[in-house]
Amino acid sequence: MTIASRRRIYWFLFLVAAASLAASGVLGVSVLAHKIDLSVLADSGAFHKGSFLGLAVDSARVTAVGLMAVAAFSSLCLAYILATFRKTVSSEIFFFSFWVLSLGLEALRLLVLRLAGGGYAVGTVIFVSRLVLGFRLAGLLSFFAASLYAAGFRNEKLGSALAVICFAAMTLAWAMPIDTGVHETGFLLRPGYRTMAVALAAVLALATVLDFFYASFSTGEHSYRVVALGAGLALAGQALVLAMWQPLAMLAGLALLFLGSWLLVSRLHAYYLWQ
Protein backbone atom coordinates (compact mmCIF):
# COMPACT_ATOMS: atom_id res chain seq x y z
CA MET A 1 0.00 0.00 0.00
CA THR A 2 1.49 3.32 -1.08
CA ILE A 3 1.93 6.43 1.06
CA ALA A 4 -0.66 8.24 -1.08
CA SER A 5 -3.28 5.52 -0.58
CA ARG A 6 -2.65 5.51 3.16
CA ARG A 7 -3.07 9.26 3.23
CA ARG A 8 -6.45 8.95 1.52
CA ILE A 9 -7.55 6.23 3.96
CA TYR A 10 -6.49 8.22 7.02
CA TRP A 11 -8.24 11.29 5.68
CA PHE A 12 -11.41 9.21 5.15
CA LEU A 13 -11.25 7.78 8.67
CA PHE A 14 -10.72 11.22 10.17
CA LEU A 15 -13.63 12.75 8.21
CA VAL A 16 -15.96 9.92 9.25
CA ALA A 17 -14.89 10.39 12.88
CA ALA A 18 -15.44 14.16 12.60
CA ALA A 19 -18.92 13.58 11.16
CA SER A 20 -19.66 11.18 14.01
CA LEU A 21 -18.51 13.83 16.49
CA ALA A 22 -20.82 16.41 14.93
CA ALA A 23 -23.76 13.99 15.02
CA SER A 24 -23.02 13.04 18.62
CA GLY A 25 -23.06 16.72 19.55
CA VAL A 26 -26.50 17.29 18.02
CA LEU A 27 -28.03 14.12 19.46
CA GLY A 28 -26.20 14.38 22.78
CA VAL A 29 -27.46 17.92 23.40
CA SER A 30 -30.98 16.66 22.67
CA VAL A 31 -30.61 14.10 25.45
CA LEU A 32 -29.18 16.65 27.86
CA ALA A 33 -31.97 19.10 27.04
CA HIS A 34 -34.69 16.49 27.64
CA LYS A 35 -35.74 16.60 23.97
CA ILE A 36 -35.50 12.83 23.48
CA ASP A 37 -38.03 10.49 25.04
CA LEU A 38 -36.25 8.31 27.61
CA SER A 39 -39.27 6.19 28.50
CA VAL A 40 -37.93 3.27 26.44
CA LEU A 41 -35.00 3.08 28.87
CA ALA A 42 -37.24 3.32 31.93
CA ASP A 43 -39.53 0.60 30.56
CA SER A 44 -36.48 -1.66 30.11
CA GLY A 45 -35.16 -0.99 33.61
CA ALA A 46 -32.13 0.67 31.99
CA PHE A 47 -32.60 4.17 33.40
CA HIS A 48 -30.67 4.83 36.61
CA LYS A 49 -30.22 7.84 38.84
CA GLY A 50 -27.30 8.81 41.06
CA SER A 51 -25.24 11.74 42.27
CA PHE A 52 -21.83 13.17 41.44
CA LEU A 53 -20.14 15.95 43.40
CA GLY A 54 -23.46 16.68 45.05
CA LEU A 55 -25.31 16.96 41.75
CA ALA A 56 -28.11 14.69 40.60
CA VAL A 57 -27.18 12.70 37.50
CA ASP A 58 -28.78 9.93 35.50
CA SER A 59 -27.47 7.16 33.27
CA ALA A 60 -28.87 8.55 30.01
CA ARG A 61 -27.22 11.95 30.29
CA VAL A 62 -23.92 10.62 31.61
CA THR A 63 -23.84 8.11 28.75
CA ALA A 64 -24.63 10.87 26.23
CA VAL A 65 -21.76 13.03 27.54
CA GLY A 66 -19.49 9.98 27.48
CA LEU A 67 -20.36 9.22 23.87
CA MET A 68 -19.62 12.80 22.85
CA ALA A 69 -16.27 12.60 24.65
CA VAL A 70 -15.39 9.28 23.00
CA ALA A 71 -16.27 10.72 19.59
CA ALA A 72 -13.98 13.67 20.35
CA PHE A 73 -11.21 11.26 21.35
CA SER A 74 -11.64 9.34 18.09
CA SER A 75 -11.39 12.52 16.01
CA LEU A 76 -8.35 13.82 17.90
CA CYS A 77 -6.50 10.51 17.78
CA LEU A 78 -7.14 10.06 14.06
CA ALA A 79 -6.08 13.66 13.43
CA TYR A 80 -2.80 12.91 15.23
CA ILE A 81 -2.29 9.73 13.18
CA LEU A 82 -3.05 11.64 9.97
CA ALA A 83 -0.55 14.35 10.89
CA THR A 84 2.26 11.95 11.85
CA PHE A 85 1.83 8.80 9.74
CA ARG A 86 4.40 9.96 7.18
CA LYS A 87 7.05 9.21 9.78
CA THR A 88 6.37 5.48 9.44
CA VAL A 89 4.51 2.94 7.35
CA SER A 90 3.45 0.88 10.37
CA SER A 91 0.84 -1.79 9.65
CA GLU A 92 0.10 -1.81 13.38
CA ILE A 93 -0.98 1.83 13.32
CA PHE A 94 -2.98 1.23 10.14
CA PHE A 95 -5.18 -1.39 11.81
CA PHE A 96 -5.18 0.44 15.15
CA SER A 97 -6.73 3.45 13.40
CA PHE A 98 -9.81 1.38 12.52
CA TRP A 99 -10.25 0.49 16.19
CA VAL A 100 -10.08 4.21 16.97
CA LEU A 101 -12.77 4.90 14.38
CA SER A 102 -14.99 2.17 15.84
CA LEU A 103 -14.98 4.10 19.12
CA GLY A 104 -16.20 7.23 17.36
CA LEU A 105 -18.98 5.23 15.70
CA GLU A 106 -20.30 4.31 19.15
CA ALA A 107 -22.11 7.64 18.80
CA LEU A 108 -24.66 5.72 16.73
CA ARG A 109 -26.01 4.54 20.09
CA LEU A 110 -27.48 8.03 20.46
CA LEU A 111 -29.27 7.50 17.16
CA VAL A 112 -30.70 4.21 18.48
CA LEU A 113 -32.20 6.09 21.42
CA ARG A 114 -33.52 8.84 19.14
CA LEU A 115 -35.18 6.34 16.81
CA ALA A 116 -36.66 4.26 19.63
CA GLY A 117 -37.92 7.32 21.50
CA GLY A 118 -39.33 8.82 18.31
CA GLY A 119 -41.49 5.80 17.54
CA TYR A 120 -39.61 4.71 14.42
CA ALA A 121 -40.00 1.19 13.06
CA VAL A 122 -38.47 -1.52 15.21
CA GLY A 123 -36.63 -2.88 12.18
CA THR A 124 -34.77 0.42 11.82
CA VAL A 125 -33.76 0.42 15.50
CA ILE A 126 -32.55 -3.17 15.19
CA PHE A 127 -30.54 -2.33 12.06
CA VAL A 128 -28.67 0.55 13.73
CA SER A 129 -28.07 -1.56 16.85
CA ARG A 130 -26.53 -4.30 14.73
CA LEU A 131 -24.36 -1.73 12.94
CA VAL A 132 -22.94 -0.56 16.27
CA LEU A 133 -22.24 -4.15 17.35
CA GLY A 134 -20.62 -4.90 13.99
CA PHE A 135 -18.42 -1.79 14.08
CA ARG A 136 -17.42 -2.58 17.67
CA LEU A 137 -16.38 -6.13 16.79
CA ALA A 138 -14.60 -4.96 13.63
CA GLY A 139 -12.63 -2.53 15.78
CA LEU A 140 -11.55 -5.25 18.20
CA LEU A 141 -10.59 -7.55 15.33
CA SER A 142 -8.61 -4.72 13.73
CA PHE A 143 -6.71 -4.11 16.97
CA PHE A 144 -5.98 -7.85 17.13
CA ALA A 145 -4.76 -7.75 13.52
CA ALA A 146 -2.40 -4.89 14.49
CA SER A 147 -0.89 -7.10 17.18
CA LEU A 148 -0.49 -9.99 14.72
CA TYR A 149 1.59 -7.78 12.42
CA ALA A 150 3.73 -6.80 15.41
CA ALA A 151 4.21 -10.47 16.30
CA GLY A 152 5.52 -11.33 12.83
CA PHE A 153 2.50 -11.85 10.57
CA ARG A 154 3.40 -10.71 7.06
CA ASN A 155 0.72 -10.00 4.49
CA GLU A 156 1.13 -6.92 2.35
CA LYS A 157 -2.50 -7.00 1.21
CA LEU A 158 -3.80 -4.85 4.06
CA GLY A 159 -7.04 -4.13 2.23
CA SER A 160 -7.83 -7.83 1.88
CA ALA A 161 -7.20 -8.42 5.57
CA LEU A 162 -9.47 -5.50 6.43
CA ALA A 163 -12.22 -6.83 4.15
CA VAL A 164 -12.10 -10.22 5.92
CA ILE A 165 -12.32 -8.46 9.30
CA CYS A 166 -15.36 -6.40 8.26
CA PHE A 167 -17.11 -9.41 6.73
CA ALA A 168 -16.57 -11.53 9.85
CA ALA A 169 -17.68 -8.74 12.19
CA MET A 170 -20.87 -7.92 10.32
CA THR A 171 -21.72 -11.59 9.85
CA LEU A 172 -21.49 -12.18 13.59
CA ALA A 173 -23.46 -9.00 14.34
CA TRP A 174 -26.29 -10.03 12.03
CA ALA A 175 -26.27 -13.62 13.32
CA MET A 176 -26.67 -12.46 16.92
CA PRO A 177 -30.26 -12.52 18.22
CA ILE A 178 -31.65 -9.18 19.41
CA ASP A 179 -34.27 -8.63 22.11
CA THR A 180 -36.55 -6.15 20.38
CA GLY A 181 -38.29 -5.07 23.56
CA VAL A 182 -35.38 -4.38 25.88
CA HIS A 183 -32.80 -1.60 25.78
CA GLU A 184 -29.50 -1.60 27.65
CA THR A 185 -28.32 1.30 29.79
CA GLY A 186 -26.02 2.19 26.87
CA PHE A 187 -29.10 2.65 24.60
CA LEU A 188 -28.64 -0.41 22.34
CA LEU A 189 -31.23 -3.13 22.09
CA ARG A 190 -30.06 -6.01 24.24
CA PRO A 191 -28.21 -8.68 22.19
CA GLY A 192 -28.52 -12.37 22.89
CA TYR A 193 -25.62 -14.58 23.99
CA ARG A 194 -24.29 -11.59 25.91
CA THR A 195 -21.92 -13.70 28.01
CA MET A 196 -20.38 -15.19 24.88
CA ALA A 197 -20.00 -11.75 23.29
CA VAL A 198 -18.24 -10.38 26.39
CA ALA A 199 -16.01 -13.45 26.53
CA LEU A 200 -15.06 -13.04 22.86
CA ALA A 201 -14.16 -9.38 23.43
CA ALA A 202 -12.08 -10.32 26.48
CA VAL A 203 -10.22 -13.06 24.58
CA LEU A 204 -9.45 -10.70 21.69
CA ALA A 205 -8.22 -8.02 24.10
CA LEU A 206 -5.99 -10.47 26.00
CA ALA A 207 -4.60 -11.95 22.78
CA THR A 208 -3.84 -8.46 21.48
CA VAL A 209 -1.82 -7.50 24.55
CA LEU A 210 0.00 -10.86 24.61
CA ASP A 211 0.93 -10.53 20.92
CA PHE A 212 2.56 -7.16 21.57
CA PHE A 213 4.46 -8.64 24.52
CA TYR A 214 5.57 -11.52 22.31
CA ALA A 215 6.79 -8.99 19.74
CA SER A 216 9.10 -7.48 22.36
CA PHE A 217 10.84 -10.84 22.76
CA SER A 218 10.80 -11.94 19.12
CA THR A 219 12.23 -8.63 17.87
CA GLY A 220 14.35 -7.83 20.91
CA GLU A 221 12.76 -4.36 20.92
CA HIS A 222 11.72 -3.18 24.39
CA SER A 223 9.43 -0.52 22.88
CA TYR A 224 6.86 -3.22 22.22
CA ARG A 225 6.48 -3.70 25.96
CA VAL A 226 5.35 -0.10 26.22
CA VAL A 227 3.09 -0.70 23.22
CA ALA A 228 1.61 -3.73 25.00
CA LEU A 229 1.00 -1.60 28.08
CA GLY A 230 -0.63 1.07 25.95
CA ALA A 231 -2.84 -1.52 24.24
CA GLY A 232 -3.91 -2.93 27.60
CA LEU A 233 -4.74 0.52 28.98
CA ALA A 234 -6.66 1.54 25.86
CA LEU A 235 -8.69 -1.68 25.79
CA ALA A 236 -9.42 -1.37 29.52
CA GLY A 237 -10.59 2.19 28.87
CA GLN A 238 -12.89 0.97 26.11
CA ALA A 239 -14.36 -1.67 28.42
CA LEU A 240 -15.09 0.93 31.09
CA VAL A 241 -16.66 3.38 28.67
CA LEU A 242 -18.86 0.69 27.12
CA ALA A 243 -19.95 -1.06 30.32
CA MET A 244 -20.31 1.74 32.88
CA TRP A 245 -22.40 4.88 33.17
CA GLN A 246 -21.15 6.24 36.51
CA PRO A 247 -19.25 9.55 36.01
CA LEU A 248 -16.05 8.41 37.76
CA ALA A 249 -15.92 5.18 35.74
CA MET A 250 -16.53 7.13 32.54
CA LEU A 251 -13.77 9.61 33.36
CA ALA A 252 -11.37 6.79 34.23
CA GLY A 253 -12.18 5.04 30.95
CA LEU A 254 -11.54 8.18 28.92
CA ALA A 255 -8.24 8.80 30.72
CA LEU A 256 -7.12 5.25 29.96
CA LEU A 257 -8.11 5.65 26.30
CA PHE A 258 -6.02 8.79 25.90
CA LEU A 259 -3.00 7.50 27.82
CA GLY A 260 -2.98 4.04 26.26
CA SER A 261 -3.40 5.31 22.70
CA TRP A 262 -0.67 7.92 23.13
CA LEU A 263 1.76 5.30 24.46
CA LEU A 264 0.97 2.91 21.61
CA VAL A 265 1.19 5.39 18.73
CA SER A 266 4.21 7.31 20.02
CA ARG A 267 6.25 4.19 20.75
CA LEU A 268 5.41 2.58 17.40
CA HIS A 269 6.49 5.78 15.63
CA ALA A 270 9.72 5.81 17.61
CA TYR A 271 10.42 2.15 16.84
CA TYR A 272 9.81 2.38 13.10
CA LEU A 273 11.85 5.56 12.75
CA TRP A 274 14.93 3.59 13.76
CA GLN A 275 14.34 0.74 11.31
Image: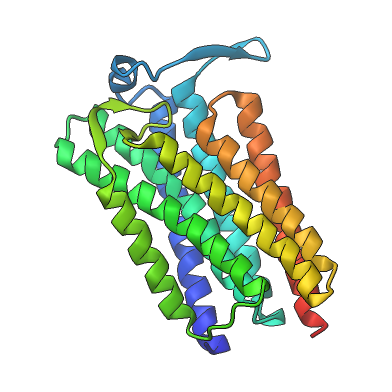
- The residue depicted at 73 percent of the width and 58 percent of the height is 228
Q: Residue 192 lies in what quarter of the image?
A: top left
The residue at the point 28 percent across, 22 percent down is: 40
User: Is 211 drawn above or below residue 36 in the view shown?
Assistant: below
Give me the residue at 73% from left, 49% from top. 259
Which quadrant of the structure image shows residue 69? top right
Vertically, is 28 above or below 36?
below
The one nearer the camera, 151 or 120, is 151
Out of 127 and 222, give the one closest to the viewer: 222
Work out whether residue 267 or residue 62 is closer to the camera in this orientation and state it.
267
Question: Looking at the figure, which quarter contains the C terminus?
Answer: bottom right
Q: Write the residue at 28% across / 25% down.
A: 182
Q: How is the image coloured?
A: rainbow
Q: Position of residue 248 (x, y in %)?
A: 66, 26
Percent x, y of residue 244: 54, 29
Could you tell me if residue 162 is visible in this image? Answer: yes
The image shows a total of numbered marks equal to 0
Q: Position of residue 77 (x, y in %)?
A: 62, 59
Res 97 seen here:
no
Q: Is residue 63 left or right of residue 236?
A: left
- The answer to whether residue 115 is left or right of residue 222 is left
Image coordinates of residue 50 in percent, x first then y, are: 55, 12
